[in-house]
Image (tube, coloured by chain):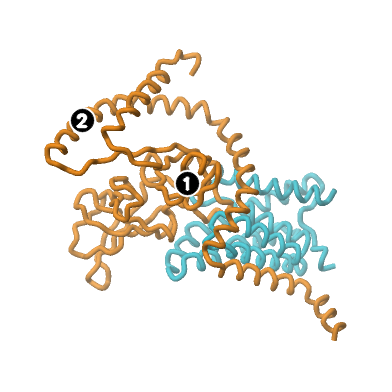
Amino acid sequence: MKTFYLLVTLLGFLLLQAILAPRIALGAISPDFVTLLVVFFALYRGPISGAILGFAIGFLQDLGVPEMLGLNAMVGAAMGFLVGHAGQKTFPEHAAFLFGLFFIAVLGRDVVYLLVYHWPRVDSAFVRIFMEGLPSAVYTALFGVLVDRIVALFGARVVSIGKEGQ
Amino acid sequence: MQHLISSVMQKHRDRLVLAVLILLSLTLLILPQPTKLSIAQDALNGLFVPVERWTAFVEDYSGLRDENKRLKRMVASLTLERERLLQFRDERERLRRLAAFKEDHFYRLSPAEVIGRNLDRLQTVLVIDKGAADSLAVRMPVFSYQGLAGRLINVFENSAWVQLITSKSHPVSCVDKRSRVVGILEWRQRDMFELTSISVVEDIAVGDTLLTSGFGGVIPKGFPVAVVTYTAPESDGLSLLVQARGVVNFLALEEVFVMTDEIPWDRSVFYEEADTLMMRDILLQPRGTR
């Protein structure tokens, strides 16, 4: 049953990214539901599962731009791992902490990705980080906290201390 | 020894998993481009295309009525404009024949709908609903109503990937519409481009339209790509910094046209008749059936 819920959640977030994200985008600034999914999952299941899902989702993203195949997968794996550890060592149920975590995860991913993609033209990378990465990180973090609070209203918790760490 | 290895693996399991995943990613990154393309092509065909077709169907259904109205208005104005252009075309062809110019061509455009985008919001690849079954092939140029949008980088049986020109790997040879100065248009960020290889003495001004030059033989000449927004001498004193904004709204592309073929002007008369009849049918439909 747990696997079923997991698959439904995965599919739900991917559909949100494919359908909802372009519709609520403000120009080039849009929420990153895929990163949200990895962060939630890493917080819920811990660093190993977080890293594996981050890698798998990143690989799916890479398929669209095969010239950089592996880059999103690597960044996703590192992000899932770090978030999973952060969730074990701190208090992920706190809204401000969650906001910060989502913000850093999205921005961190964008910084690494854009610097590698635009290398050696780092000026273009920094313009995109400031114009797209920063506002998208805020937008995504707000959505993340909102999703967590909505789920909490129904008596469930998306975020709990990672099982692998216990 | 075995006990020690097992103990280390147990203690640092998470780091080992991460190390394996990073190694795998790095291996993928350093693979040759054709291998990467082949991996991505196989995986994408199996995974994404069916899902994207379904989601595109749901999205399309909701906007169909508005789109239909908009298109009919467009057809009406284009029909009038077309009649005028046909007269100009005949006149132009007569003059070209008198001047013994090389035979000019008309383009065969295949319309396609965008059925998906890469899940990565920082990237610039579209998936369209036509492929090899519709005679599409890799490197064919892709246009929107506004101008050049990109080119096909991968063609499957019933879908294809469009690499937009908002990509590092897609420089376009352009010519200034007013002064005919030629340069290479390279993407910088968002919808901003830079026209490179321009000497400081060249005549390029803010507001000039940059068209495809046709050099290279892949993208035909004369299609709008960008409008110059800023010019200034570079610090070396020899070259000119030319910034331009793309004419296509890359974030809102819903339908595109793939250029599949070129046909001589005089043979395009076949399309005239068919198109005119089709447009008449559309415009003369009773109001209730629209």
Give the number of marks: 2
Whole-number angstrom distance, CA of label 1 to CA of label 2: 38 Å
Q: Residue at x 56, y 61 (%)?
A: B36
Residue B192: which quarter of the image? bottom left
B255 over B164 or under it: above or below:
above
Q: Chain of mark 2?
A: B
Q: Do the residues indicated by labels 1 and 2 lie within the same chain of the protein?
A: yes
Q: Badge 1: few (under 14), some or many (20 or more) residues near its Cα, within 10 Å?
A: few
In the rendered picture, chain B carries what hue? orange
Q: Amino acid at mark 2?
A: Asp
Q: Quadrant of the N terminus of chain B?
A: bottom right
- Residue closest to the eye, B35 or B167: B35
Q: Residue at x 14, y 36 (%)?
A: B95
Q: Are marks 1 and 2 in contact (CB under 8 Å)?
A: no
**On the picture, is B65 further left or further right than B236?**
right
B111 over A148 or under it: above or below:
above
Q: Badge 2: few (under 14), some or many (20 or more) residues near its Cα, within 10 Å?
A: few
Q: Amino acid at mark 1?
A: Leu
Q: Is residue A96 visible?
A: no
Colour-to-chain, cyan = A
Q: Secondary structure at mark 2?
A: helix
Q: Is residue B11 visible?
A: yes
Q: Residue at x 65, y 72 (%)?
A: B23
**On the picture, is B235 further left or further right than A146?**
left
Residue bearing mark 2: B90
Residue bearing mark 1: B251
